[in-house]
Image (spheres, rainbow, N blue to C red):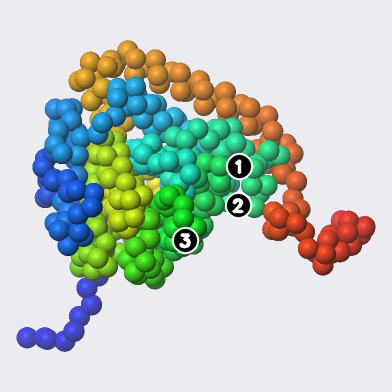
Amino acid sequence: MDERPRLTIPEPRFRPGDDPDFSGIDIPGAGETRRPDVDAEPREMRDLADGLIRVLGDDNKATGPWQSDLTAAQLIKGLTDMMRVREFDRRMMAAQRQGKTSFYMQCLGEEAIACAFRAAMADSDMNFPTYRQQGLLIAHGYPLVDMMNQVYSNEEDPIKGRQLPIMYSSRAHGFFTISGNLATQFIQAVGWAMAASIKGESNIAAGWIGDGATAESDFHSAMVFASTYQAPVVLNIVNNQWAISSHQSLARGRADTFAAKGIGFGIPALRVDGNDYLASHSTAVWALERARRGLGPTLIEWVTYRAAAHSSSDDPSAYRPPDEAAKWPLGDPIERLADHLIELGEWSDERQQELTDQIEEEVRVAQAEAESHGTLHEGPKPTRDIFEGVYEKIPPHLQKQRDLLEGMTWRE
């Protein structure tokens, strides 16, 4: 027998040409996962790292200890937010295909996570997002036209062309500038939360990364600092099953779940059905309350599925079956919330169609306004000045350089 050490190369469940079958995945029934007290000790809730918090059942009813206290009006607001995100994504992806922008990334199938989390936050809290949390901005009322202006890099681009099209930034909306380097968001969130605590503030930070980024060293450094100093931070791992083209098993290693990575650091760790708006909201409320009461960090694994390509530069048919998204067992977050509202008697197919038409028109009008200011290859571009946006007040040596440049005559 050959007993030489051998490397293990993890493989996804399915490859192109396979028939996806998720029946082997253990999905607890809605309402089965217990809800601990907010002040429970981490060691008392280790089982939650292997569970799955769910509220909405197959019968479209809400059940169990994690039921949200959201009103029908708040649920309709959540539904509207998710639908607005999806239509925004659809139009911007089409614009990229038309050559109006260089790059775009959708969050198709993941809308509930960001929208529900933002609904649970205070205005003074701060998110440290990746490039797939546009729902945090849209659910908080950030103007669609401003987002589109940045996507188009036109004269009204609020970032003035300094970022990739989808790397938004808005301090007023609690949305820290997106970093293209993965996992830095966790380090930044923990540091911001520690600073807020030192200053005596009650503001909470939320860090966001994908499943693949848990393999980065910044993830582990952030976990050490969050655990050691009990920082008021919520650390979110959006497990959408795929990194750019590699399956989540490569980053998870031999751990059963990503949430389990929190146990070794003594951090409460939860797994949530990320396609369940109610479960997502109530979990966010729980974790944010824990942080705000000085009880330290929480690690949350949001279990969802990236239904679209990783970006406009990606072709997922090269690494997964084309019908894999349709067979994902946790369903579509928008359809699930709409069906729940219908079950409550607060919604109907007719109202759903009316809302769809309304949002499509709203986003169409916003797009027309944004394009009136230019797109990638047409119209005026943002005014660029390398000296602006660096210091609150330009120091003398840079002012001297600026004056010198302004006095130069440039030749083509």
Q: Nearer the viewer, mark 3 or mark 1?
A: 3
User: Disc 3 versus disc 1: distance between alpha carbons?
Assistant: 34 Å
Q: Element type at marker 2?
A: loop
**Residue closest to the far left:** 1
Corner quadrant of residue 347: top left
Q: Amino acid at mark 1?
A: Gln
**Percent from the top left, x then y, of residue 156?**
68, 38
Which residue is drawn at the image coordinates 47% and 40% (left, top)?
A: 123
Q: Which residue is mark 2?
A: 163
- Residues marked 1 and 2 touching at CB (< 8 Å): yes
Residue 411, can we see it? no
Question: Residue flagged by tag 2: what amino acid is it?
Answer: Gln
Closer to us: mark 3 or mark 2?
A: 3
Quadrant of the frame with the N terminus: bottom left
263 sits to left or right of 90: left
Residue 264, located in which quarter of the rendered image? bottom left
Q: Which mark is residue 185?
A: none
User: Looking at the image, which residue is at 14% across and 27% down?
Assistant: 59
Q: Position of residue 211 (x, y in %)?
A: 33, 57
| Sequence-earlier tag: 1 or 2 | 1
- Gap in Å between the C-alphas at discs 1 and 2? 8 Å
Left or right of residue 133, residue 178 in this image: right
Give the spatial CA distance, label 3 vs label 2: 31 Å
Mark 3 highlights which residue? 198
